[in-house]
Amino acid sequence: MSRVRDVFSKGKAFIPFITAGDPDLATTEKLVPAMAKAGADLIELGIPFSDPIAEGIVIQEADMRALEAGTTTDKLFDSVKRIRKETDVPLAFMTYINPIFVYGSERFIKNAAECGIDALIVPDMPFEEREELLPLCQRFGVELISLIAPTSKDRIQTIASESEGFIYCVSSMGVTGVRTEINTNIAEMVSLVKEVKDIPCAIGFGISTPEQAKEMSRHADGVIVGSAIVKIAAKYGKDCVEPICQYVKEMKAAVSG
């Protein structure tokens, strides 16, 4: 079984997202092992990018802070190597197609695999274009995670049938960010997936409170939270490790409940 699939075999998964290098890479290197100890089952590392089209203002600002702190893709690969000496928690890179192409797709995926990355999430890559990266991911043993959105209705089952690792269910349209309520029929999205493939479904975009996480975990196999954690990083800067880990504990308890 893949390390990514294995995450979901132990019950409902809590998957936090952080922007790598915010406030700096030294903090990221402390934060990842600490979050794993606090209950994170899989951790998404956002690679900072100057034009993150799927992101709301919270993560856009985090990307700017990380870039201003000197974060580069190569430095991030080195950081992941150091993180791997501290924890074996599954890790996924979240990035955009343009930085991968600019870096060189084969070099990027090979380096990601060599430093210990388990999965890759590329929100702006249409499913129909995944062949650009899929053969490379398969060659180097990095799982390419597919996303489905409320608008994917007619395509959900096609996407699900060819997916690996887990399905990233986007709970609401628009960019990432905290939302007061989530109106998408998540149960319907998940059931469409499960009709064609027994693959875990994790829900992200907009979830911020333990109550929301608990509600979403009733319908899915995992819950993904990004902006709410990035807000804590923005507030506390280099002192963010403890408050973020406290939040992770609360959210993990909510999804496990």
Image (cartoon, rainbow, N blue to C red):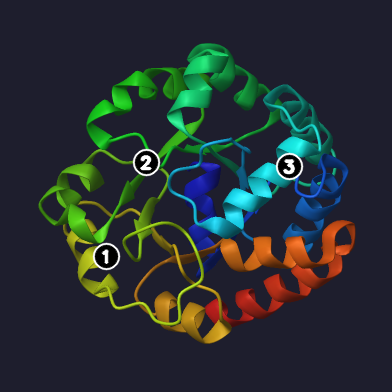
**x then y, percent, for residue 115:** 70, 27
The residue furthest left is: 154
Q: Quadrant of residue 85?
A: top right
Above or below residue 98? Residue 51 is below
Give the residue type at disc 1: Val
Q: Position of residue 184 (x, y in %)?
A: 27, 73
In the image, 108 versus 59, the foreground residue is 59
Pointer 3 residue? 66
Q: Which residue is mark 2?
A: 164
Whole-number angstrom distance, CA of label 3 to CA of label 1: 34 Å
Give the mark nearest the N terminus, 3 or 1: 3
Q: Are marks 2 and 1 in contact (CB under 8 Å)?
A: no
Residue 175 picture quarter: bottom left
Residue at left offset 59%, top offset 53%? 59
Question: Does residue 218 appear in this view?
Answer: yes
Circle 2: is it few (<14), some (14-19), or many (20+) Cα within 10 Å? some
Callout 1 environment at 10 Å: few (<14), some (14 to 19), or many (20+)?
A: many
Q: CA distance from mark 2 to mark 1?
A: 15 Å
- Whichever of labels 2 and 3 marks the residue nearer the N terminus, that label is 3
3D distance between C-alphas at marks 2 and 3: 30 Å
User: Eyeballing the image, is 22 above or below 103?
Assistant: below
Mark 1 lies on residue: 190
